[in-house]
Amino acid sequence: DNKSLTIAIDGPASSGKSTVAKRIAADLGLIYVDTGAMYRTLTFEALKNNVNIKDQKALVDLLEKTEITFEPDEKGQSVFSNGVDVTYGIRDNNVTNTVSVVAAHPKVRQLMVKRQQDMAQDNGVVMDGRDIGTVVLPDADLKIFLVASVKERAERRHKENKEKGIFSDLDQLKKDIAERDYKDSTRDSSPLKQAEDAVRIDTTKMTIDEVVDTIKNLIKKA
Ligand code: CDP
Ligand code: CDP
């Protein structure tokens, strides 16, 4: 029965996690939990309220006052912060380039992980992030680790921006992605790391459909 399945999808920025996770969740009738959006929402609120992103205690206080919820819709899913739609705001460059600092605080992570585990308590979920297979859902039915070259990932973001009418510089994108990879994989508190029992898929030369099919076949076997 699919309804109680838990699927963990981790990997670096722009490896295709959210695109693929959304598709699989929709196809199998599972809830999609975008944990990156939760760290982005806290970062968005910190920037908006002039909270110092290096001040762990201030961030924890802010997070305790911030309810983060997801609602499915035509576009896939929208994100709300205390009921306010922040779906677009949290993708802003200011957020993207500071979120790794916010996400490195152990006490911030502790609270986030607790919320994420609660969401998977009574529901089948496809959850994507950095530490899902290692920390949040160590007993997931299936763990996937998506990777792709920095060049390919920067090109994907570039194309995505172009389609949205947003200007971006490809070389700068490469630098930003490499920088975020570095910060996410070298932090002390649950760094980005492949779980031992995760299946690694290199998507550099794969289409979205191919990645989705590969994972669906693994689900059938799991
Ligand atoms: O979509 P993109 O790959 O740009 O990133 P995201 O999944 O929205 O995550 C944004 C940032 O949140 C990451 O670069 C990490 O610093 C942090 N994050 C994390 O630390 N742990 C997670 N489970 C998910 C995201
Ligand atoms: O969630 P994450 O940051 O890992 O990546 P994403 O936002 O799902 O994917 C980044 C971009 O790459 C999107 O525009 C996807 O359509 C695209 N993509 C792709 O071109 N080929 C793939 N195999 C996976 C994603």
Image (spheres, rainbow, N blue to C red):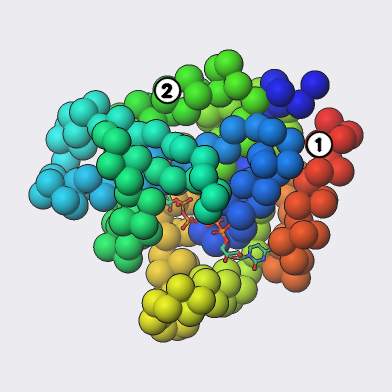
Q: Position of residue 11 (x, y in %)?
A: 59, 51
Q: How many marks?
A: 2
Closer-to-camera residue (137/211): 211
- Badge 2 amino acid: Lys
In primary-sequence order, the first of circles 2 and 1 is 2
Q: Position of residue 122 (x, y in %)?
A: 58, 16
Residue 83, picture quadrant: top left
Q: Residue furthest top?
A: 122
From the image, which quarter does the C terminus lie in?
Answer: top right
11 lies above or below 96: above
Q: Is mark 1 within 8 Å of ligand 2?
A: no
147 lies above or below 134: below
112 lies above or below 165: above
Dividing the image into four equal quarters, which quarter contains ligand 2?
bottom right
Horizontal arrangement in the rendering, residue 104 relative to residue 24 (left or right): left
Q: Residue furthest front?
A: 74
Q: Position of residue 12 (x, y in %)?
A: 54, 55
* Residue at 60% from the left image edge and 59% from the top image edge: 15
Q: Which mark is on residue 219? A: 1
From the image, which quarter does the N terminus lie in?
Answer: top right
Residue wearing tag 2: 114
